Amino acid sequence: MALHGCLQGFRGYADTHALGQALKALQEEGLDQLPLPGSGETLVRFSRLAEVAGHDLRLCKLFEGHTDALAIFAELRSPLPPSGSIWGMWAAEPPTAKVRVRREGQRLRLDGRKAWCSGATVVSHGLLTAWDEQDRQQLVAVPMQHAGVTVTDEGWNAVGMAASGSVDVIFDGAWGLAVGAPGDYLARPGFWQGGVGIAACWYGAAQRLAEALREHGSSRKEPHALAHLGAVDSALHSAACVLRAAAEQIDRAPTANAQQLAQQTRACIEATVEQVIRHVGRAVGAGPYCKDPHFAQLMADLPVYLRQSHAERDLAALGEQVAGEPTGRWQL
């Protein structure tokens, strides 16, 4: 079954449980088996992420995390996850929530609180960052049914992206297995490659909003709406070219450090998405916000999802790299 056909079977997700059912359906159809970053088909991976995002960003949040976890297992040559398992990938490290691990034999014992755990109530396993006795970051795989795992209803009061259920999880003597060595999560090439994949999700949602504007413009030849459509088309064309070029560069040099590429791409796509939101909203007016559930949900969800960007902090990090480079970087 094609991804589009499977997605059409699920509309109007009322809650996290419904999202979990949709994610499980994608997994059972094998549609979570995306090409790995740097495999020569990175653009296919980005395109599928964008397609899920255009269908429903809340589902995409869970789908992207699950497929990112699978890619990490492959990249770090870890044992294959259990058949039929659904994964959450949780790497946020706010100062108020930190998980500690200590090794006991072949297993790791986890204690602490993990924040922003999307889909924690519906996934079978979590792949999360924690900190060992030497204060090194370590990836840990944990079955969510363990007695030492408590999924709270705390830390998530969102309106947009509400059903993604990005709650706090408490680990109290839970057992897990190390995935890779300390430091591997950030050191691997796939970390920044995956960051470009997030931008593809943003793009997919913006593309779907643009389709609503195109449909609006085709039925009403209103000059201002058409001008907005022209601006959206120009912005999305540029963004698509950037994503295609990024995928090509990743495939051409799959082990290279993709930090600057990811920061450039994410900045471009973020700016594009903000333009699309503005132009589409001004062109279509209040009607779709109030009468089109899919449009209204995307408009509520996308600004929240977009804040996976760190805005000016990310731009400053990019600027710091560029400032130290020789002149001529922007020549054709």
Image (tube, helix red, strand yellow):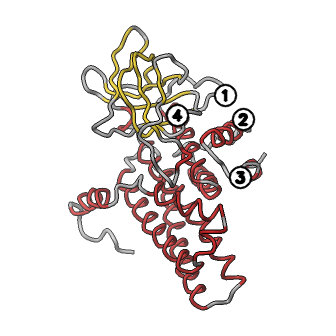
Disc 3 and disc 2: Cα gap in Å? 18 Å
Whichever of labels 1 and 3 marks the residue nearer the N terminus, that label is 3
Question: Hey, which residue is sitting farthest top in the picture?
Answer: 105
Residue under label 1: 84
Q: Secondary structure at mark 1?
A: loop
Disc 2 and disc 4: Cα gap in Å? 19 Å
Q: Position of residue 250 (x, y in %)?
A: 48, 51
Image point 22% across, 63% down: which residue? 323
Residue type (three-letter) at the residue carrying disc 1: Gly
Quadrant location, the N terminus:
top right
Question: Hey, which residue is sitting farthest left in the picture?
Answer: 324
Q: Residue 28, labelled with which disc?
A: 2
Between 242 and 306, the one lying in front of the other is 306
Q: Position of residue 103 (x, y in %)?
A: 35, 14
Whichever of labels 3 and 2 marks the residue nearer the N terminus, that label is 3
Residue under label 4: 120
Disc 4 and disc 1: Cα gap in Å? 16 Å
Badge 1 density bin: few <14, some 14–19, many ≥20, Cα 10 Å: few
Whichever of labels 1 and 2 marks the residue nearer the N terminus, that label is 2
Decide if residue 260 is on the left or right side of residue 14: left
Residue type (three-letter) at the residue carrying disc 4: Ala
Whichever of labels 4 and 1 marks the residue nearer the N terminus, that label is 1
The reply to whether discs 1 and 2 touch (Cβ–Cβ < 8 Å) is: yes
Residue under label 3: 11
Disc 3 and disc 4: Cα gap in Å? 21 Å
Disc 3 or disc 2, which is closer to the eye? 3
Would residue 248 be seen by someone viewing this image from the given angle?
A: no
Residue type (three-letter) at the residue carrying disc 2: Glu
Quadrant location, the C terminus:
bottom left
Disc 1 and disc 3: Cα gap in Å? 23 Å
Question: Hey, which residue is sitting farthest bottom in the picture?
Answer: 223
